[in-house]
Image (spheres, grey):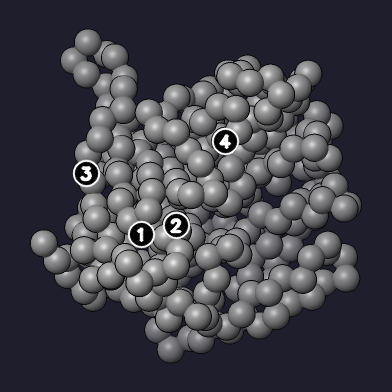
């Protein structure tokens, strides 16, 4: 996990299972006072103590550009900043990384949603160490809808757009002429899929997170928290809604489950950290196989 300690202007790389921690100073070039910064931690397979951190944020006049830098545990230093201009529809409104959702890795690129005066997707290509912006064909109001980048069906980049009880699954496709564009792959009515009476709910469903290794979306609804695999339309109810709150922030943590081994995480307080980490035992959920089948 990557945690931003904004008061100390540091990053904490933390494995909640093993307890391993690494503190990193935020590199120059990131304005953390007025805009959000986000990032991702990448670990080498089979080598737990080797990792990379990709940090993204805003810079420039009116925060008109996105910047990124990469930290390597092998060298112990940050790379030079790379940047890209952000489209500006309204110069008085900032464009920022949507920090309610974690980054998603598709291929060898990391993706984040951008919100503010422009709604789109920020891409960081790990091979080229470059940033680019992809427009999206929907208008996102984070107060009334939820959105997350996903790995699309069959591979490639995609995103889910949830407004009220309707979920749209979009995929970035390239045609025979080499022109890339968004294609609406599927529309799902959540109230029908999850057998909900939408008139009974005082709040619309919200996307809590996306578990990319299992391609599973975590959803809060007024009848409970569900994990849903939108390719197969299989789902499973995890918890009653009163135990989760849609306005909190959740981090979908995936790890290897060893049979016969139990992992418990309780409330954690670190005097060096800026926040109380309320990681409760019931939040550690084993994803496992999806048990319920889709309903037509």
Depicted 206 relative to depicted 277: above or below: above
Disc on the earlier residue, 1 or 4: 4
Disc on the earlier residue, 2 or 3: 3
For the residues carrying marks 1 and 4, which lies nearer the camera in this image?
4
Q: Crowdedness of circle 2 by 10 Å Cα count: few (<14), some, many (20+)? A: many
Rendering coords of residue 179 (x, y %): 29, 14
Distance Cα–Cα, label 4 vs label 2: 16 Å
State the residue at coordinates (41%, 61%). Answer: 205
Rendering coords of residue 164 (x, y %): 37, 53
Rendering coords of residue 170 (x, y %): 30, 37
Distance Cα–Cα, label 1 vs label 4: 23 Å
Disc on the earlier residue, 3 or 4: 4
Q: Residue 216: which numbered mark, if any?
A: 1
Distance Cα–Cα, label 2 vs label 3: 17 Å
Disc on the earlier residue, 1 or 3: 3
Question: In which image quadrant can residue 18 be found?
Answer: bottom right
Rendering coords of residue 94 (x, y %): 68, 30
Q: Residue 115: which numbered mark, if any?
A: 4
- The residue identified by callout 3 is 186
Nearest to the observer: residue 286 or residue 259? 286
Q: Residue 207: which numbered mark, if any?
A: 2
Distance Cα–Cα, label 3 vs label 4: 23 Å
Nearest to the observer: residue 184 or residue 54? 184
């Amino acid at each position: 996990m990557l945690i931003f300690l904004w008061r100390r202007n540091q990053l904490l790389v933390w494995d909640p299972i093993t307890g391993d921690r690494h503190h990193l100073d935020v590199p120059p070039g990131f304005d953390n006072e007025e805009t959000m910064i986000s990032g991702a931690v990448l670990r080498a397979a089979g080598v737990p103590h080797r990792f990379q951190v990709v940090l993204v944020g805003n810079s420039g006049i009116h925060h008109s550009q996105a910047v990124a830098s990469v930290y390597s545990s092998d060298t112990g230093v940050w790379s030079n900043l790379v940047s890209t201009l952000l489209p500006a529809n309204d110069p008085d409104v900032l464009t920022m990384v949507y920090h309610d959702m974690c980054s998603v890795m598709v291929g060898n690129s990391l993706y984040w949603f951008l919100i503010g005066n422009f709604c789109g997707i920020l891409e960081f290509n790990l091979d080229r160490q470059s940033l680019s912006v992809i427009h999206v064909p929907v208008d996102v109001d984070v107060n009334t809808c939820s959105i997350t980048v996903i790995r699309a069906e069959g591979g490639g980049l995609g995103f889910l757009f949830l407004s009220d009880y309707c979920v749209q699954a979009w995929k970035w496709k390239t045609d025979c002429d080499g022109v890339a564009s968004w294609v609406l792959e599927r529309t799902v009515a959540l109230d029908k899929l999850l057998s909900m009476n939408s008139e009974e709910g005082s709040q619309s469903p919200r996307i809590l997170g996306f578990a990319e290794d299992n391609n599973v979306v975590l959803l809060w609804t007024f009848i409970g928290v569900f994990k849903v695999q939108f390719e197969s339309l299989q789902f499973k109810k995890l918890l009653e809604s009163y135990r989760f709150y849609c306005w909190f922030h959740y981090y979908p943590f995936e790890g290897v489950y060893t049979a016969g081994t139990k992992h418990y995480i309780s409330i954690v307080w670190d005097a060096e950290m800026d926040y109380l980490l309320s990681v409760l035992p019931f939040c550690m959920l084993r994803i496992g196989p999806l048990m319920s089948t889709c309903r037509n």
